[in-house]
Image (cartoon, helix red, strand yellow):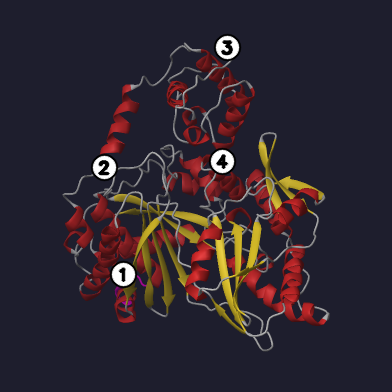
Amino acid sequence: MTDTETTETETREELFALPASFGQKRMWLLEQAGSGTALYTMRAALRLRGPLDHGALERALTEVVARHEVLRSVLRLDGNDIAQVVLAPGPVALPVVEVPGGPEAAVALAAELSREPFDLAAGPLLRCSLLRLSDEDHVLLALVHHSVCDGMSLGVLLRELTALYEPCLHGTAHPLEELPLQYADYAVWLREQVASGALEEQLAYWGERLAGVRELRLPADLPRPAVRAWSAVSAPVKAAAPVVRQLRLTAPGGGVTASMVALAAYAVVLSRWSGQNDLVVGLPVAGRPEVDLEPLVGFFVNTLPIRVDLSGDPSFGELLAQVRDRCVEAYSRADVPFELMVERAHPDRRAGRLPLAQTLLNVQQSVPPVLAAITGVTLEPFELPDTALQFDAVADLVEQGDAVTGHVSLSADLFTAETAALVARSLSSVLRAASAAPGTALSALPCPVADARAAAPVEAYEAYEAYEEVRTAVPAGGGKPQTPGEHLLVALWREVLEVSEVGVHDEFYALGGNSMRAVRIVTAAREQGLELPLDRMLGQHTIREVIAHTEAAAAAAGHRTTAAPAAA
């Protein structure tokens, strides 16, 4: 962020504040737990070849930010909740950066600029740059924090920017219609839906469907590091149209899409690789149930945790029918924010791990972005490779008719590039073999990653089992506080969780805790001199576990953790 941008944001008038959306609250929590990273930065780039007027493009950007309140919003802790604070519109800078090394240098610079984290409380949460390759060759780079943007929103941003360029160049009226809503309106509406009980049936479904779900434990190639770099290793995937079409046509009951075929195959690979027959795969969905939401920028995307049961060694065709049914059920209950699914399901939580879904399957339609024409300028998407990964494994695929292409990415903290290639090959192999013989049992389908990694050190399993042993060795309830820190947390838990009795071995979420209550306890403890790690608080924990971890971290840092004694 430049000095100019900082000054503009700090001096811009605050118009109003409203409660953040459920998705924004999750993004805020994730940022607090992993501050200093740029994991949740959305990126888009557009190459513009031809004579370009920088001033007109900068004015067009200013107009887009004025139209969409969320692009001039910040997120701040407001009492016991997170608020989105909307700032007054004003000029938006579009700095020009000289890039003498051509497109490859522009990709490298984009990666460098993407690593600069956002300050959610200060903003701005949108940073744009014009990378100048030559006099008539530029790359427009847009970096937006995920809390105010999603994949569809990036398309809206680029579409409006190109539509406004020529009106800003010639000083004429722009063709864009007035927005029917703003993102804050949607956030308030969704909160009202939840508060009124309108989503209770959907919430009940997710609670029942996800009850007792266990974490996906993939056998890692590398020891899990204390501090993760969040980088990725990737490999390409390709499934030919005849293969996918054959599986769609032979599925019992019909009604199967290419994305359902991909999900079934991905579940087979994950199951064979991990040895687990009950697993959850997250499916991103647009999260825009009304047509009036389509022209808006904002964080609408939702994640549907699809639970797949592979027990009993069914055939691929049988699995595909199950995946179809569960996807249809989930799509009809997609209004529930993922954050509320987590609260209703009460899954195991671990520090530094995402709850419910540790892997994602993202299948998109191959639809080119709709951009307005600019006289004398050729517009084309500028591809930026993904460099950061929040999950252990992600499959990013694109449907082109019945063909499916894309790539599989694994956490470079845990897996090698060779394993990523094996997973990608396994996905293609499962699809080809199942297409040739849909009645084949899952255990008989070729899965190179399972064969190659079956005898490898299973660090993820061992770490998880050791963690479980420690947890089960701790008494389930009771326990009197012994240290000043434990006394303080007992008092805070009683107050925040509104319970009369708290023991140092009681588990936070079992007592009715949730993410925002964890934030309240961290904030209150810090006010009384006890620094608690938020990432630890967001995982399953007892008072004794948190204090022990905090004291060990403080000792390692060379200072003591102190807290004023509190009444038991």
Mark 2 vs mark 4, CA separation in Å = 28 Å
* Image coordinates for residue 183, horizontal then vertical, percent: 69, 58
Q: Does the magenta run of residues contain 92?
A: no
Q: Name the residue under label 4.
A: 32
**Residue 435 drawn above or below residue 511:** below
**Residue 49 drawn above or below residue 486:** below
Q: SS of the residue at dot 1?
A: loop
For residue 265, which quarter of the picture? bottom left
Q: What residue type is labelled 3?
A: Pro
Image mark for residue 252? 1
Q: Which amino acid does label 1 sit on?
A: Pro
Q: SS of the residue at dot 2?
A: helix
> Mark 2 near mark 3, Cβ–Cβ under 8 Å?
no
* Image coordinates for residue 283, horizontal then vertical, percent: 45, 59
* Image coordinates for residue 127, horizontal then vertical, percent: 64, 60
Secondary structure mostly taken by the magenta-highlighted segment of the chain: loop
Lower position in the chain sequence, tag 2 or tag 3: 2
Mark 2 vs mark 1, CA separation in Å = 39 Å
Q: Name the residue under label 2.
A: 459
Q: Quadrant of the N terminus?
A: bottom right
Residue found 23% across the figure and 55% down from its top: 272
Q: What stretch is highlighted in magenta?
A: 249-257
Mark 4 vs mark 3, CA separation in Å = 27 Å
Lower position in the chain sequence, tag 4 or tag 3: 4
Q: Does the magenta run of residues contain 255?
A: yes
> Mark 2 near mark 4, Cβ–Cβ under 8 Å?
no
Lower position in the chain sequence, tag 1 or tag 4: 4
Q: What residue type is labelled 4?
A: Gln
Q: Name the residue under label 3.
A: 565
